């Protein structure tokens, strides 16, 4: 096997990020402070949200978003099985029950129809309603029928949380009976949770953010993130009050400073990812054995966080294709194996902490899907190598 020459992802770090962190270290204030507040303000402006609260991870953001909306023991929460484990973990860590929903046919995300099906199946099985929906927006696209999902949640009086880990630069088409407009991701209904893991649209090493437009809910999130303490970002303020329960989910100023530096170049990073996605499109749009599954919704403008394709080949499996690419020094990945197929969730299903609706579409898609290398520093000649390798492998079988 060749050494990896084209990684699945490479973070976009330059001297501006290094200097931003160094400046905080020279200041002597390393914990959560003024750089965090600045990052929150800039992030809210970038996403079109009214408020933002920085966290130590997207998992922490999801946990606090759910807790701030009153989700806890005795509640059941819809989560798509085709997501990263953090989405479900945040529900379980709040003591609530996970109800797995399917994704739509030929779709990477849950729909209003699959969510309603999961709600009705859970009610028929247990006699109980659900309290919230967490929708995972996949690969940088906003769920195609987010308007219908929001209406379903309003109809049933349940909470909507958006897992926007992939979606910093995303926007969606908002339709009303009299108008339609493109809105940035922070205008989504409900709370939004973002990730700054190294492979995300921007990175702080680790970190997350909650955005929203309800001052009281955001205040509850802020208290949860910081031990329930009510005080300003002033290192000399000893006279604080603990007003609620809380956790140590703060983001340090070092990470926030890096986040600010990354935000300043986020449009350029987005442009590079989008350009690479379009080059893949030109190669794979009418491919005999591949179907592009990201970046194709007419109602969403994608951040192009992932470039995912579904394999439909008579003799080669998805796993064999990934293995053959790796033999040529090219990394690919899978987003994701459905959670209900993992050992721990199968155990949780058996003990009643997780409920499954029929997940036919999730199983079908996840066995065929793979994500190709995509990141701002990916060079055209490297991408040509990926495209050539994929075609050569598929045509050889």
Image (spheres, helix red, strand yellow):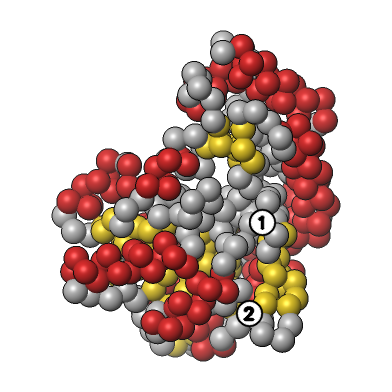
Q: Are there few (<14), some (14-19), or many (20+) residues within 10 Å of tag 2?
A: many
Q: Quadrant of the N terminus?
A: top right
Residue 225 in the image: above or below residue 7:
below
In depth, the one of 371 and 208 nearer the eye is 371
Q: Residue 51 vs residue 117: left or right? A: right
- Of helix, strand and loop, which one carries label 2? strand
Mark 1 is surrounded, within 10 Å at the Cα level, by few (under 14), some (14 to 19) or many (20 or more) other residues, namely some
Q: CA distance from mark 1 to mark 2?
A: 28 Å
Is 242 in front, or is 393?
A: 393
Quadrant in which residue 172 is drawn: bottom right
Residue drawn at (77%, 47%), measured in percent from left and top? Answer: 274
Instruction: Return the residue at label 2.
Output: 51
Given this view, does label 1 or label 2 mark the residue nearer the observer? 1
Q: Is residue 356 above or below residue 51?
A: above
At x 61% / y 11%, what residue is drawn?
A: 396
Q: Is residue 149 left or right of residue 157?
A: right
Which residue is at the far left? 351
């Amino acid at each position: 096997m060749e050494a990896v020459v084209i990684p699945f992802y490479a973070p976009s770090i330059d001297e501006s990020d290094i200097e931003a962190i160094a400046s905080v270290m020279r200041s002597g204030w390393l914990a959560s402070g003024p750089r965090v507040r600045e990052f929150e303000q800039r992030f809210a402006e970038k996403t079109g949200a009214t408020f933002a609260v920085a966290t130590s991870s997207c998992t922490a953001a999801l946990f606090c978003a759910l807790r701030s909306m009153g989700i806890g023991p005795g509640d059941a929460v819809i989560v798509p099985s085709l997501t990263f484990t953090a989405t479900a973990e945040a529900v379980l860590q709040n003591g609530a029950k996970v109800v797995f929903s399917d994704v739509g046919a030929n779709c990477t995300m849950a729909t209003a129809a699959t969510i309603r099906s999961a709600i009705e199946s859970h009610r028929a099985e247990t006699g109980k309603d659900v309290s919230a929906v967490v929708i995972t927006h996949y690969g940088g696209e906003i769920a195609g029928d987010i308007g219908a999902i929001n209406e379903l949640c309003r109809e049933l009086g349940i909470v909507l949380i958006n897992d926007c880990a992939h979606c910093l630069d995303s926007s969606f088409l908002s339709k009303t009976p009299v108008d339609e407009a493109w809105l940035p991701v922070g205008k989504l209904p409900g709370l939004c949770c973002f990730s700054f893991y190294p492979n995300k649209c921007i990175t702080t090493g680790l970190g997350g953010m909650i955005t929203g437009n309800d001052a009281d809910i955001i205040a509850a999130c802020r208290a949860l993130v910081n031990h329930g303490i009510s005080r300003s970002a002033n290192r000399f303020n000893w006279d604080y009050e603990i007003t609620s329960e809380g956790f140590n989910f703060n983001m340090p100023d070092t990470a926030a400073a890096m986040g600010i530096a990354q935000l300043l170049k986020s449009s350029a990073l987005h442009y590079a990812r989008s350009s690479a996605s379009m080059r893949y499109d030109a190669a794979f749009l009418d491919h005999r054995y591949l179907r592009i599954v990201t970046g194709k919704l007419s109602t969403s403008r994608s951040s192009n966080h992932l470039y995912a394709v579904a394999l439909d080949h008579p003799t080669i499996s998805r796993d064999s294709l990934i293995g053959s690419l790796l033999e040529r020094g090219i990394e690919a990945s899978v987003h994701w194996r459905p959670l209900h197929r993992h050992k721990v969730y199968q155990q949780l299903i058996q003990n009643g902490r997780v409920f499954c609706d029929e997940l036919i579409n999730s199983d079908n898609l996840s066995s065929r899907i793979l994500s190709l290398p995509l990141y701002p520093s990916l060079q055209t000649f490297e991408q040509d190598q990926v495209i050539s390798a994929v075609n050569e492998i598929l045509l050889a079988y």
